[in-house]
């Protein structure tokens, strides 16, 4: 009986070793998407009062966990019973990401002054602004999470169903903890800086480090905002290129990054055009 118990432990150990290896490979392959996920969500988790940053980030993190709880079993079931559906889901998600990225560019180029005039209204309705930004962040996270889970699943398709489930689950958990843990550190940089300055009485190395942290945060946020927008378009273009044969073989000599960005940009312009057309048609139907 004892030997049977130790045999079970040995099997569990061997399984965990296999999962550790496959999870490492899957994490390496999803590193690019995780970087994009970080850039996008760091930008979405900022712009609030200091006291609200962590509660908002926690709400987004919970939404991300719920996303993955939904996505992982659905992806495994679809891959087993109806694998073609995953491709269509990814393409629809790609249009959403492209729409978000291009909409931000259009907002920056053509509506900056209008946005500035409306800023006071947004500040007066903090709760509504929080809910809108959390909803947008969780929706974007859902699309990126689908991409992460599908890529992770693709690395273990030749393995047993147990290893598939464990590997994808480990990658999903690591993605959530890693991305939102780093985002939490970024959004609290200025508070940490202020505390260092106060602790050192604004003297010495700690004070200098604190001032660097405080002054660096706005720059980092602007960089992440730019990087997040570019990431949305690049990820969407990558989804189209990897899942649509015509686009995959289109202009094969063109640098993949340029091709993916161009395709994502075109898809985003189409999506924005359709969205604006629908917005104009809705009042006509109501009347």
Image: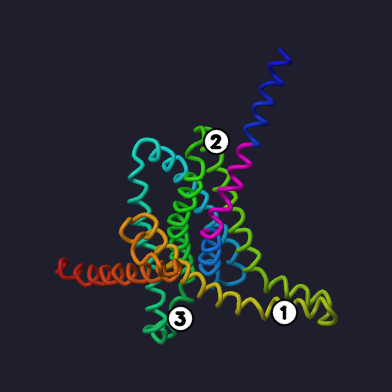
Q: Position of residue 267 (x, y in %)?
A: 33, 67
Q: Are marks 2 and 1 in contact (CB under 8 Å)?
A: no
Q: Which residue is mark 2?
A: 163
Judge whether residue 20 is colored magenta.
Answer: yes
Residue at 81% across, 82% down: 202
Which one is closest to the eye, mark 3 or mark 2?
A: 2
Q: Is residue 130 left or right of residue 267?
A: right
36 or 238: which is nearer to us?
238
Magenta range is 18-33
Q: Position of residue 187 (x, y in %)?
A: 62, 68
Instruction: Name the residue at 33% across, 55% down.
Output: 245
Q: Is residue 6 above or below residue 73?
A: above
The residue that disc 1 covers is 212
| Front label number (2 vs 1) | 2
Q: For the residues labelled 3 and 2, say whether their Cβ atoms are less than 8 Å apart.
A: no
**Under tag 1, what secondary structure?**
helix
Residue, far top: 1
Colour scheme of the picture: rainbow
Residue, disc 3: 119
Q: Dot 1: few (<14), some (14–19), or many (≥20) neighbours within 10 Å?
A: some
Quarter holding the N terminus? Answer: top right
Q: Are marks 3 and 1 in contact (CB under 8 Å)?
A: no
Q: Is residue 273 above or below residue 67?
A: below
Kindly report the secondary structure that dominates the magenta region of the rendered protein: helix
| Kind of element beneath mark 2 | helix
**Which of 200/229 is in front?**
229
- Measured in 3D between alpha carbons, the distance from the residue under mark 3 to the one under mark 1, in whole angstroms, is 28 Å
What is the CA distance from the residue labelled 2 to the residue labelled 1?
45 Å
Tell me which corner region of the image, top left, top right, bottom left or bottom right, holds residue 31.
Answer: bottom right
Nearer the observer, disc 3 or disc 1?
Answer: 1
């Amino acid at each position: 009986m004892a030997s049977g118990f130790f045999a079970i432990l040995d099997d569990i150990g061997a399984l965990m070793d296999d999962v550790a290896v496959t999870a490492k490979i899957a994490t390496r392959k999803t590193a690019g998407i995780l970087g994009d996920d970080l850039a996008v969500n760091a930008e979405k988790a900022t712009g609030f009062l200091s006291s609200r940053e962590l509660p908002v980030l926690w709400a987004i993190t919970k939404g991300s966990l719920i996303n993955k709880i939904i996505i992982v079993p659905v992806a495994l079931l679809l891959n087993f019973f109806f694998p073609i559906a995953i491709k269509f889901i990814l393409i629809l998600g790609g249009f959403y990401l492209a729409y978000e990225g291009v909409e931000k560019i259009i907002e920056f180029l053509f509506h900056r002054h209008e946005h500035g005039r409306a800023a006071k209204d947004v500040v007066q309705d903090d709760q509504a602004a929080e809910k809108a930004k959390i909803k947008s962040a969780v929706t974007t996270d859902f699309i990126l999470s689908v991409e992460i889970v599908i890529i992770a699943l693709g690395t273990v398709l030749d393995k047993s169903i147990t290893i598939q489930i464990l590997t994808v689950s480990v990658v999903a958990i690591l993605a959530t903890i890693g991305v939102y843990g780093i985002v939490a550190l970024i959004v609290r940089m200025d508070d940490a800086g202020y505390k260092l300055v106060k602790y050192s009485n604004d003297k010495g190395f700690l004070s200098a480090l604190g001032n660097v942290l405080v002054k660096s945060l706005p720059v980092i946020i602007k960089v992440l905002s730019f990087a997040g927008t570019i990431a949305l378009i690049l990820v969407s273009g990558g989804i189209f290129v990897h899942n649509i044969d015509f686009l995959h073989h289109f202009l094969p000599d063109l640098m993949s990054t340029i091709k993916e960005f161009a395709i994502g940009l075109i898809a985003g312009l189409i999506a924005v055009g359709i969205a604006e057309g629908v917005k104009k048609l809705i009042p006509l139907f109501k009347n």
